[in-house]
Amino acid sequence: MELAQQNTEGNTMSQRTKVSGTGPRPTEGFGVPMTETNPHCFLVRVPKSNSGAVEIVENLGVKSKDDSGEEIVRVILDRPRWTAIRQEVQRIFNNRLKEHKLATSRWKVGENPVDRLLGKELCVLAWAVEKMDEENIPVAVRNWMAFRPEERWWLFSMTAMSTGLYYEGDKGWRVALRHALGDVPQHELFKPRGVKKRPADHAELPPDLFSQDTNKE
């Protein structure tokens, strides 16, 4: 499945959400097609332990070098941070799936397959919050939601090229994402700055050319 609305040149991409004549194709998890063998996707592994860390892995599937399904661990989130983002991410992803008339899903203990484009978007948010002060995470979620999908894909591509592994959280783009999403709400950052009006009694009057400067002796 491709949920892409635009490619990097801004052209509309074909959306392969239907098999001709048969209606929407069956999926598992968040939009991963069941009709493909070993598809390129992401896997979100949620352990049974309530305190266990959540692992987000990119499974290259048939695109791996030996077609065996090479996996790249992109990020590991401690449980409180995962809990802080999981509900909003689930809601956003399900809304996108509904737009394409695909089955919705929910996070569960175990392995959660995620469409490769949605997985990229999830990584951007997870990278931003992995070492963020927890009180700033709601701001990061709102800022992440304010981005268009193609903007999230671009951020993933730029970050993954240089600092895309789970142990590279204190480098380059990973640090930049943390500050970009967690410091200032987007609506505040780009809000027009109004000009404050002076009270009427303090309004400036045209200078009186014949008045004397009382500060001079």
Image: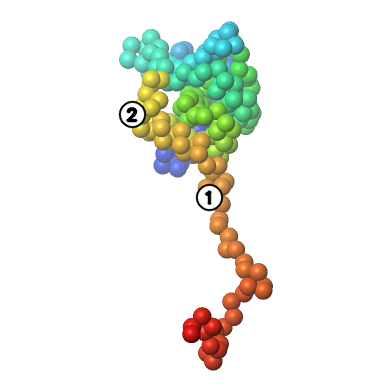
For residue 72, above or below residue 2: above
For residue 195, above or below residue 7: below
Compute the Cα span from label 1 to label 2: 28 Å
Task: Look at 45% across and 13% down and name the residue there.
Answer: 38
| Quarter where residue 110 is shown | top right
Is any atom of residue 217 visible in this view? yes
Q: Callout 1: helix, strand or loop?
A: loop
| Residue type indicated by callout 1 | Phe
The x, y position of residue 8, in whole percent, is 41, 39
Q: Which mark is residue 190?
A: 1
Identify residue for label 2: 162
For residue 30, above or below residue 141: above
Is any atom of residue 25 visible in this view? no
In the displayed structure, does residue 196 sit left or right of residue 177?
right
Is the image coloured rainbow, by chain, by secondary structure, or in one colour? rainbow
The x, y position of residue 94, in whole percent, is 62, 26
Q: Of callouts 1 and 2, which one flags the residue occurring earlier in the amino acid sequence?
A: 2
Q: Callout 2: helix, strand or loop?
A: helix
| Residue type indicated by callout 2 | Ser
- Front residue of 59 and 140: 140
The x, y position of residue 164, in whole percent, is 38, 25
In the displayed structure, does residue 173 sit left or right of residue 91?
left
Task: Look at 54% across and 38% down and name the residue there.
Answer: 143
The x, y position of residue 104, in whole percent, is 64, 22
Task: Look at 38% across and 9% down and name the residue there.
Answer: 68
Q: Residue 137 carries which label?
A: none
Instruction: Check the image and name the residue furthest to the top.
Output: 48
